[in-house]
Image (cartoon, coloured by chain):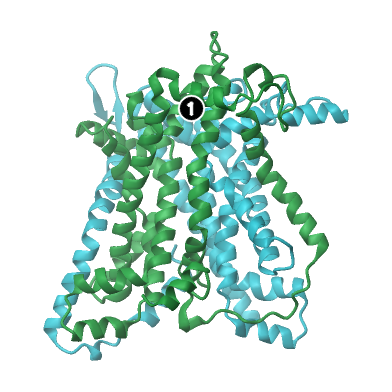
């Protein structure tokens, strides 16, 4: 990849490629004050709950229920809360975080790789059965994954795979939407003549894919990776039914478990601030990943995702 | 998503066969294509096709207290279609879809258009902040809103009381569905906005030039050029929203803990199927419910797409 391409990718510019050309048309760049105010008011709706979560994670249990929710109050107990969070039940929260990270990274890398290879094949080769296979993949986007979870659970249980990490990772490897995205993206981003040139040079198809194809698919890869990562990270239904040992839980199932223990009461009132602090800590990694990767996935989606 | 752009791609992208030099190259490339597809195909079949077929098979049996399972034909389906719990749940998610999805997608479209017009200050920050809730798991979003809704200490109730509106009850049987719609809207407006925004960014410039010559304003431009141009993207968000609404699970199952009177074990079909399978141990009936839910989603998605295609054709004829 040339320096120019890299810069374009980092600034999120002109990934659409030469075929489409980015719009240069800007008839009216006046700012609109009412629109700005309206949009920022709307932003409040999306941000205030997260602000509440942060503020609440700095409160101890009594302040949580006695001070105004959207501002700090009582003692600043964030460190105490974090300490409790990371030591409760022998530090199981750390384990849950590690599990979530492991499941979602493994699933996302696997799903991205599978979707990329399949999307590349659909975009760059002619072969019998292509149309039927692609239609089947597209149709599968419509299959509700949770409707599949139950029979998958039964099959896994017969295979002795329930209550193992595999039960969460393997079903998350299928990403029909990822294949669709990669197909459109690869069709756009990889020039056929480049592949022909590599073939003339005597490179095999797999070498061409690894050395030429993959390098041109950067933003598309990040987009599919991020979508799969979020899907697995945020999944609740699948791990809930597949896993029994709390040692194997991801954050979502673990947090739901301490929350229900907290609501059930029984002298475990202190758990509320643990649930809230845990929720706050659990969303930090994805929020940070989003901040860092936004340029990539936005350009990946723009050129590949949803062409009109 | 077999909407028109994909199909037309298929036609235009097919390389002319005459250009292929020799049979060996062709064969080698075919083999490579199949090998590239193999890993995905294997998981696709084992994780989608096989479970789906298994659910279908299982749903034809009946669990007996003694003697295990016996073939029951379509009895489970008959039971489901007359089961008020299942039908009520289905009606509930149907209502959810009809009310929540237009609000959510309308907001998403408004934000996408507003940001694309580049007329607001801090567009980049706005875009990112609206998108942020998508990074929050449904579990955390529901827990969080559960606290926010709280009648005693929730900040919304605190503010309402301070202003003199009394205490709103977000967790009663009458309002819980609306409260749930709010949670899902909060979570997914940004996600849908990004899909639409990305599509808006890739509208070719020529489309705007014509509108400029006609002297179209921002609203006219949005209505007559931008929205029609990103219709496939909007359709995509509609399909995803159908799937999402009909299989609601995390929200009802977690709200059940704080509002047990408002959320029944059959509040949504998916939650019902879960309770049937894992609490009542009625596996075959749960499989039938899951399978039926899948059919409902496929049918609704298909009907919506068909209606859209018909509309498109009609508009083409008119113009």
Identify the secondary structure beneath mark 1.
helix
Q: Measured from the top left, where is residue A45 in percent x and y? A: 70, 44
Which residue is nearer to you in this view: B221 or A107?
A107
Residue at 47 percent of width and 63 percent of height? A296
Q: Measured from the top left, where is residue A84 in percent x and y? A: 50, 21
Does residue A142 appear in this view? no
Q: Measured from the top left, where is residue A61 in percent x and y? A: 62, 18
In the depicted structure, whether residue A226 falls above or below residue B22:
above
Q: Give the residue furthest to the right.
A: B164
Give the drawing colour for chain A: green
Residue at 50 percent of width and 17 percent of height? A261
Which residue is nearer to you in this view: B97 or A240?
A240
Viewport quadrant of the N terminus of chain B: bottom left
Q: Quadrant of residue A219?
A: bottom left
In the depicted structure, whether residue A33 falls above or below residue B10:
above
Q: Which residue is mark 1?
A: A256
User: The chain drawn cyan is chain what?
Assistant: B
Which residue is nearer to you in this view: A285 or B290?
A285
């Amino acid at each position: 990849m040339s320096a120019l391409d890299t810069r374009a990718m980092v600034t999120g510019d002109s990934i659409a490629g030469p075929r489409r050309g980015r719009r240069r048309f800007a008839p009216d760049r006046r700012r609109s004050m009412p629109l700005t105010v309206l949009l920022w008011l709307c932003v409040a709706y999306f941000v205030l709950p997260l602000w509440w979560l942060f503020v609440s994670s700095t409160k101890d249990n009594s302040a949580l229920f006695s001070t105004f929710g959207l501002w700090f109050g009582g003692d600043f107990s964030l460190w105490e809360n974090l300490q409790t969070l990371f030591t409760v039940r022998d530090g199981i929260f750390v384990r849950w975080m590690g599990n979530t990270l492991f499941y979602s990274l493994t699933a996302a890398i696997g799903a991205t790789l599978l979707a990329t290879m399949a999307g590349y094949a659909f975009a760059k080769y002619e072969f019998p059965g292509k149309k039927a296979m692609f239609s089947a993949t597209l149709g599968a986007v419509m299959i509700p994954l949770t409707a599949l979870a139950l029979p998958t659970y039964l099959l896994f249980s017969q295979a002795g795979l329930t209550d193992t990490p595999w039960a969460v990772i393997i079903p998350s490897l299928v990403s029909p939407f990822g294949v669709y995205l990669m197909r459109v993206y690869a069709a756009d981003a990889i020039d056929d003549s480049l592949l022909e040139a590599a073939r003339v040079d005597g490179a095999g198809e797999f070498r061409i894919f690894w050395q030429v194809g993959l390098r041109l698919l950067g933003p598309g890869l990040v987009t599919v990776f991020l979508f799969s990562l979020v899907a697995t990270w945020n999944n609740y239904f699948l791990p809930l039914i597949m896993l029994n040992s709390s040692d194997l839980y991801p954050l979502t199932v673990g947090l739901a478990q301490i929350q229900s223990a907290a609501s059930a009461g029984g002298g475990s009132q202190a758990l509320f601030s643990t649930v809230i602090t845990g929720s706050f800590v659990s969303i930090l990694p994805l929020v940070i990943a989003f901040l860092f990767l936004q340029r990539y996935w936005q350009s990946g989606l723009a050129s590949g995702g949803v062409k009109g | 998503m077999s909407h028109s752009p994909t199909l037309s791609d298929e036609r235009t992208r097919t390389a002319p066969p005459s250009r292929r030099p020799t049979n060996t190259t062709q064969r080698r490339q075919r083999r490579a294509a199949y090998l590239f597809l193999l890993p995905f195909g294997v998981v696709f079949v084992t994780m989608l096709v096989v479970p789906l077929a298994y659910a279908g098979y299982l749903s034809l049996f009946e669990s007996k207290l003694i003697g295990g399972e016996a073939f029951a034909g379509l009895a489970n389906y008959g039971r489901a279609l007359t089961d008020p719990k299942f039908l009520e749940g289905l009606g509930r998610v149907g209502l959810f879809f009809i009310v929540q999805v237009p609000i959510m997608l309308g907001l998403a479209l408004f934000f996408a258009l507003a940001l694309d017009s580049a007329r607001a200050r801090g567009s980049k920050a706005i875009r990112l902040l609206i998108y942020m809730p998508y990074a929050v798991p449904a579990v955390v979003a529901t827990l969080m809103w559960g606290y926010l809704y709280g009648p005693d200490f929730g900040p919304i109730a605190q503010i309402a009381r301070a202003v003199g509106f009394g205490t709103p009850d977000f967790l009663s049987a009458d309002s819980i569905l609306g409260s749930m719609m709010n949670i899902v809207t909060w979570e997914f407006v940004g996600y849908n906005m990004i899909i639409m925004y990305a599509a808006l960014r890739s509208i070719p410039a020529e489309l705007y030039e014509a509108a400029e010559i006609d002297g179209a304003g921002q609203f006219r431009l949005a209505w007559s050029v931008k929205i029609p141009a990103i219709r496939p993207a909007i359709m995509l968000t509609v399909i995803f929203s159908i799937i999402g609404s009909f299989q609601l699970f995390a929200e009802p199952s977690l709200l059940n803990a704080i509002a047990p009177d408002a959320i029944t074990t059959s509040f949504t079909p998916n939650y019902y199927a879960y309770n049937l399978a894992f609490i009542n141990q009625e596996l075959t009936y749960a499989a039938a419910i899951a399978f039926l839910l899948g059919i409902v989603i496929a049918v609704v998605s298909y009907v919506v797409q068909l209606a859209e295609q018909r509309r498109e054709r009609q508009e083409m004829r008119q113009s």
